[in-house]
Image (spheres, coloured by chain):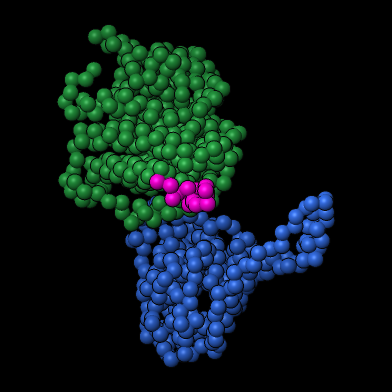
Amino acid sequence: MKIVVLVKYVPDATADRQFESDHTVDRAGVPGLLSELDEYAVEQALQLKEKAEGEDVEVVALTVGPEAAAEAVKKALQMGADSGVHVTDEAIAGSDYLATSQVLAAAVRKVGESGAVDLVLCGMASTDASGSVVPAMLAERLDLPQVTLGSVIERQGDQVRIKRDGDTSTEVIGATLPIVLSVTDQSGEARYPSFKGIMAAKKKPVETWSLADLGVDAGEVGLDAAWSKVEAAEARPPRTQGEIVTDEDGSGATALVDFLASKKFI
Amino acid sequence: MSFEISEDHEQFRRVVRDFAEKTIAPHAAQWDRDHHFPVDVVHQMGDLGLFGLTAPEELGGADGDFTSLCVAIEEIGRVDQSMGITLEAAVGLGINPIQTFGTPEQQQTWLPDLVAGRTLAGFGLTEPGAGSDAGATRTRAELRDGEWVVNGAKQFITNSGSEITSVVTVTARTGERPDGRPELSAIMLPSGTPGFTAEKAYDKLGWHASDTHPLSFSDARVPEDHLLGERGRGYAQFLATLDDGRVAIAALAVGCLQACLDMSVQYAGERTTFGVPIGRKQGLAFQVADLEVMLAASRQLTYRAAWMRDAMAGRAGGGSTPSMQDFKQAAAVAKLYATEAAVTGTRIATQVFGGYGFMEEYPVTRFYRDAKVLEIGEGTSEVQRMLIARGLGLPVE
């Protein structure tokens, strides 16, 4: 069985993020890391591998991104993935969801050349763009069934049962592999890389592919080919000072309750 | 001789720091208040592979180097000295003697669970009347009908009475040498052995969340094959593991100093008096600068000693292979300097916090209480000075 996990290298959400003059995220100026939400996907892939007794399961971590994005693959390898693929090409910079999914689809197909891909696992969203649409677009491009926002995955042979928690109901979906599956942050805490894993990761194979390797036309991706454009990006205005209630006559509690009620918190 | 911390070690440091800040730091104050030993966190540290860093792969370890263990002890100790000493003692005193001197059967029996952090082991050397003077050991083990019968008592034994302690190795007199000195051997006593009791946990100045007990043995019987290593080599075997332990305690002191510096720098920038941050006052800022110097020096000495240990085992590049004597000296120097710096450093940090430095609501107070024992455990400062002086060729007693 072969599982491809999509791992995205994102700017650290706890750092100050800046935009370039073309309104794309300044990736050079901010420390990056593997998107936390994708760590859940890596974890699920590793759990499927561990539960598959006696069966050979290969977990391939796939990223599309600039040179530094290799760090996302490295982290996945340190956690326990078997091999990595890093698609990098200057022409990809600024790609929208459609172009990103096109590059990812071509990369998944190429991974499949050395053995069919049974499962593509993704996080529920990236922690930078937060679009959540790439898994669905990728499934369409690969002509595979999609199940999104899974929280529990059970597999027997080529059959999977996926628990999907919605706002008002919980669904259990059965599917036959191969599929594209995204998992939520409720699917189980991601493991930390062990020292053994950090050392072992250095010996694991990582392939670096360009657009030409994938047979993708550079003119179809990147900022110029994007179907949507960011016209302006501004920092959120600083928070204004809140209202201070001074309790001089015992009416403070009432004022607080009125405030909370006016905001519909209670 | 040259050394530097490798990028692998730095990456591992970030992982352990992340784990420590998320899993341990938020609860450390509460565990300290409640004198609670968090067994579940020991298991989580085990999942992260911390107890098996230096154990061989066939026993579930990472086959890593000693430097990686020092990094882990420092980073855990940076948020909680109690859990730092739990790790240090579990590996240095629990796992190492069995890994180094145990038979293949003993290793298979005890190490897989210890290495995974499912269980803990202790080592009992100190007695009410015998500490650094191990020759004064009173605990006896007699071989009767194929069993060791152990009688006596030990004190200050870390990880010896927790609910997951599986075994405690103790040194005991097993006879007399021709010259009249006692023959000391190491005997492994599984938890639950009738006659072996871990008494009520100590009420300590610090390290409240670590598991420390007095032990008593009253006709505690174990099979003859529970002898660890060679008969009559109990103390010598223990000494062989002590140098590593000194460096590991120095790493714990580095974690303490790093915590002191981090807390002091932050507080000195936030707290204002007379309308300016207290960090603008030279009287205070210069003390924090001293803290940085003590941290940097302690860190260098500690990781240099750790590097020497790894280089001796052929596991580190850079420079010629140090001699055992060089390493012993470096270990004593690191332990002495880093632990005394930690005590001074916590005094500075509590001073930076002023009145709050005396209040338990700030972690700096806990570090102040925790630091003192670093100058005592695994060889007091006096013992280190004696060793260093001897290393210089002085005829010190």
- Between A226 and B383, the one nearer to me in the picture: B383
Q: Chain A is drawn in which colour?
A: blue
Q: Which of A34 and B169 is in front in this view?
A: A34
Decide if residue A255 is in sight here. Answer: yes
Residue A212 location in percent, x, y?
37, 85
Residue shown at 77% from the left, 66% from the top? A263
**Occupied quadrant, residue B313:** top left
Vertically, is A92 above or below B222?
below
Chain B, colour shown: green
Q: Where is residue B302 in the image (x, y as percent from the top left)?
A: 31, 41
| B286 versus A230 height, above or below | above
Residue B164 is a magenta residue: no
> Is-magenta flag for residue B268?
yes
Residue shown at 45%/19% (left/top)?
B154
Q: Where is residue B333 in the image (x, y as percent from the top left)?
A: 27, 34
Above or below, comparing residue A229 to residue B307 in the picture:
below
Determine the residue positioned at 38% across, 82% down: A90
Is A61 rendered above or below residue B72? below
B150 with respect to B29 (left or right): left
User: What residue sits 35% from the left and 13% below the top?
Assistant: B136
State left or right for residue B391 relative to residue A101. Answer: left
Q: What stretch is highlighted in magenta?
A: B266-282
Query: Which image quarter is the C terminus of chain B in?
Result: top left
User: Is residue B112 in sight in this rendering?
Assistant: no
